[in-house]
Amino acid sequence: MKKLFIALMLIGVAAAACAQSDAKATTKANDATAEEEVFLIVEQEAEFPGGLDALSKYLSANLTYPQEARDANVEGKVIVQFVIEKNGKVSNIKVLRDIGSGCGEEAVRVIKGMPRWKPGQQRGKPVRCQFTLPVNFQLQ
């Protein structure tokens, strides 16, 4: 009877240790997720080097009107969403609204080539934040 009781105690201790280990692993996973959280609203917004005027100039200088869109007289706004990482790099680029004829692809190409941004900040620390940018395509 003593041996059975001791065996059950050892199994109980081992199960408790495993549960505690799982809880620590879950906490670490949650901490990693918290570090990787993408903020929609931050105390200090991410900023293109030189501000909005510089962003506008960058887009104007680097955007090439797709020939297919030009031939079809396609005009409008492509809405692109992306993440500014803690180090200022642009990632996770998605076209939310496309006007077709290669305009969405061109907007993504130009955004991929952007210089590093000044990252957004939350409580004085750089954080990943989401940015939505309308890119205008207008024939002259």
Image (tube, rainbow, N blue to C red):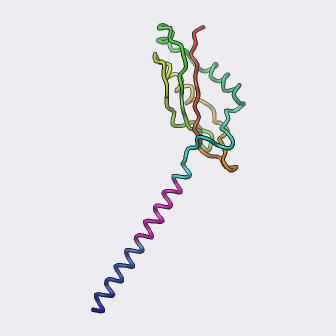
**For residue 129, what is the image quadrant?**
top right
Relative height, residue 116 to residue 29 (above, below): above
Q: Magenta part mainly helix, strand or loop? A: helix
Q: Quadrant of the C terminus?
A: top right
Q: Residue at x 69, y 28 (%)?
A: 52
Relative height, residue 4 to residue 90 (above, below): below
Q: Residue at x 63, y 36 (%)?
A: 116
Inspect the magenta stretch and tell me whether residue 27 lies in it: yes
Inspect the magenta stretch and tell me whether residue 125 lies in it: no
Query: Where residue 100 appears, x then y in whole percent?
Result: 46, 18
Q: Judge by depth and name the residue closer to the eye, 36 or 65.
A: 36
Query: Where residue 101 appears, x then y in whole percent?
Result: 46, 15
Q: Residue at x 57, y 38 (%)?
A: 130
Magenta stretch in the rendered image: 18-32
Q: Judge by depth and name the residue closer to the eye, 47 or 112.
A: 47
Query: Where residue 79 appears, x then y in whole percent?
Result: 54, 25
Q: How many discs appear?
A: 0
